[in-house]
């Protein structure tokens, strides 16, 4: 397991096997190639549906929307290695 917390305070747990996923790599490559629509799929593949909703709720503005840039920044931060590995 990989446990971590983003700089905005979002705590997450990612099973290690989620990172060894070609579909996640494909989605991240699409994001890297400018397809912002792939961000949603990448978040689901990385965090799972429950944590994706929690991330969106964490980033939701007072107006009720979830900024694409904030989600993208959170995913970059999660993947950049600012996480601590849990012994499991």
Image (tube, rainbow, N blue to C red):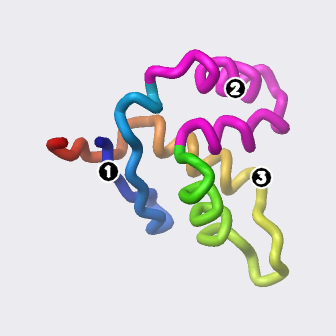
Q: Nearer the viewer, mark 3 or mark 1?
A: 1
Residue drawn at 67 percent across, 45 percent down: 72
Sequence order check, earlier mark of 1 and 2? 1
Sequence order check, earlier mark of 3 and 1? 1
Closer to us: 42 or 49: 49
Residue at the spot of label 3: 68
Label 1 – label 2 distance at C-alpha:
22 Å
Residue at the spot of label 1: 3
Percent position of residue 27, x then y: 69, 26
Query: Magenta segment range?
Result: 20-46
> Mark 1 touching mark 2, by CB under 8 A?
no
Quadrant where the C terminus sits is top left
Q: Is residue 70 above or below residue 76?
A: below
Residue drawn at 45 percent across, 60 percent down: 7
Sequence order check, earlier mark of 3 and 2? 2
Image quadrant in which you'd find residue 20: top left
Image quadrant in which you'd find residue 40: top right
Residue drawn at 77 percent across, 52 percent down: 68
Residue drawn at 57 percent across, 58 percent down: 50
64 sits to left or right of 42: right
Q: In this view, does 32 lie above or below 11?
A: above
Percent position of residue 21, x then y: 52, 21
Which mark is on residue 88? none
How many neighbours does mark 3 have within 10 angstroms: few (below 14), some (14-19), or many (20 or more)? some
Residue at the spot of label 2: 27
Q: Which of marks 3 and 2 is in front?
A: 2
Secondary structure under the numbered disc 2 in the rendered image: helix
Label 3 – label 1 distance at C-alpha:
23 Å
Overall secondary structure of the magenta section: helix
22 sits to left or right of 15: right
How many neighbours does mark 2 have within 10 angstroms: few (below 14), some (14-19), or many (20 or more)? many
Residue 32 sits inside the magenta stretch: yes
């Amino acid at each position: 397991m990989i446990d971590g917390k983003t700089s905005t305070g979002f705590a997450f747990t990612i099973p290690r096997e989620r990172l060894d996923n070609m579909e996640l790599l494909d989605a991240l490559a699409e994001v890297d190639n400018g397809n912002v629509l792939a961000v949603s799929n990448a978040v689901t593949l990385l965090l799972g549906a429950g944590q994706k909703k929690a991330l969106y709720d964490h980033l939701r503005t007072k107006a009720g929307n979830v900024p694409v840039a904030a989600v993208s920044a959170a995913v970059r931060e999660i993947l950049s290695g600012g996480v601590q590995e849990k012994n499991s």
